Amino acid sequence: MAKKKDLLFKEAKLAELIAGDRRLLQLLPRLGIGLGFGDRSVEEVCRMNNVSADLFLILCEIYTNNDYKPDSNELKRIDMSGLLPYLKASHQYYLEERFPHLEEHLQRIIKACGPKYGPMLSNFYDEYKREVMRHIKYYEEEVVFPYIEALLKGQRNESYRIDEFEHNHTNIQDVLDDMMNILLKYLPGDILPKERVEISLDIMELSDDLHRHSVIEDHLLIPYVESLENALP
């Protein structure tokens, strides 16, 4: 099988691209792309689902290449109209699926820990969730996205600029690391060991996904919105 890097072009078969990196599966529902696409190419599947193939491929690049950063000329030729719906779908996925799933498993571990470790683990998770919710739900959903939607309608809000966005990014990695240390290193070995392994894998996967989400915002969303701002008189 070809390496995933060799498959990041429009004529590549989408199934082979995803087989090269399973994380790319996460992109499909957020772009409204269903499964069952057979041996169709990336371009064919994107066209069938009204998705920009260039946008899809640049998202794939971010998910598969830790060092990737698109240059300004590359971004200028991409139709970014699908980026905001993609980010909204990502938020819905985190808030309605991933966090409830994580919390359900974590609560069973917290209950099994008893008074010595349970409150500590609960506090770390509450802080983690509070920080993520503050940024995603109360900042991006209520401030940033409405601002972008207004720009798309040709309306400028002088009280906000997108360069403020990067200063409001919340670093939750330290909280995640502390929570992982409790799960992996400090809880007694007989406290739901199988479930602790499963939830640790879930946290690692979610952490990576949230990191890619932030990279997409930094390297795609901010330049896109800056171009919208500059286009208005």
Image (cartoon, rainbow, N blue to C red):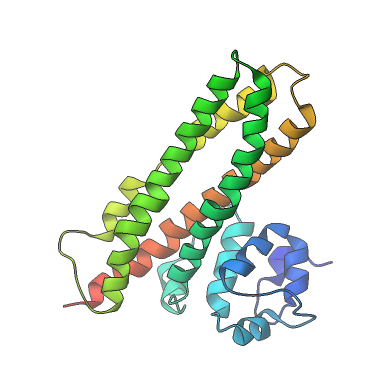
Pick the front one: 127 or 114:
114
From what the image shows, is residue 194 above or below residue 2? above
Quarter holding residue 22? bottom right
Position of residue 141 in the picture relative to residue 188 (left or right)? left
Instruction: Pinpoint residue 85: horizontal percent, then vertical percent.
Output: 46, 70
Residue at x 53%, y 49% (from the top left corner): 210
Tell me the quadrant of the picture where the C terminus can be found: bottom left
Residue at x 69%, y 23% (from the top left corner): 112
From what the image shows, is residue 200 above or below residue 161? above
Pick the front one: 186 or 20:
186
Instruction: Pinpoint residue 52: horizontal percent, then vertical percent.
Output: 54, 80
Quarter holding residue 156? bottom left
Pick the front one: 113 or 42:
113
Tell me the quadrant of the picture where the N terminus can be found: bottom right
Residue at x 74%, y 79% (from the top left corner): 37
Quarter holding residue 23? bottom right
Q: Evaluate whether residue 96 shows in this view.
A: yes
